Amino acid sequence: MVMAFVMAAVIIAGFSLNLAMGRSTFAAPFAVHVHAGIFMGWLALYLAQHVTAASRNWPLHRSLGSCSSTRTPNGSHGLWKRKLWKKRLGRPGLRSIGGL
């Protein structure tokens, strides 16, 4: 979990440094702001996933995982793979590992 917070701090510090040095501006096109908002939302979900897993709050962890899987192109592909796994093997894929 520590590394998740370190990663988030490095990302935020990097963008803040570019802003402070004048290499970035809030006058960027609207699409850049949308991209930034989506990415910061993903970063918040990433941290929340780590916190809920570390605190063993599995129901909330699973709910956040379902939410985050719809936010990324690979996430929707992952949902398809889990359904296929369940259909072929009759079990729910990775959730059966470790009693999760």
Image (cartoon, rainbow, N blue to C red):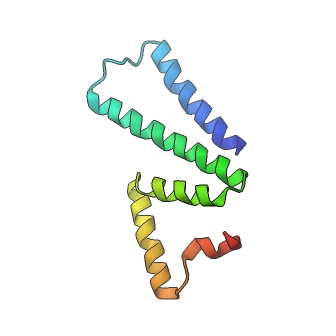
Residue 93, horizontal then vertical, whole percent: 56, 76
Q: How many marks?
A: 0
Depicted 36 relative to depicted 82: above or below: above
Depicted 73 relative to depicted 87: above or below: above
Q: Residue at x 41, y 51 (%)?
A: 71
Q: Is residue 8 left or right of residue 83?
A: right
Q: In which image quadrant can residue 27 be found?
A: top left
Q: Is residue 33 left or right of residue 93?
A: left
Q: Residue at x 64, y 43 (%)?
A: 4
Residue at the outermost bottom position? 89
Q: Is residue 99 left or right of residue 82?
A: right
Residue 22, horizontal then vertical, whole percent: 43, 12
Depicted 78 relative to depicted 51: above or below: below
Residue 47, horizontal then vertical, whole percent: 60, 43
Residue 100, horizontal then vertical, whole percent: 66, 69
Q: Residue at x 44, y 39 (%)?
A: 39
Depicted 89 relative to depicted 64: above or below: below
Q: Residue at x 44, y 76 (%)?
A: 83
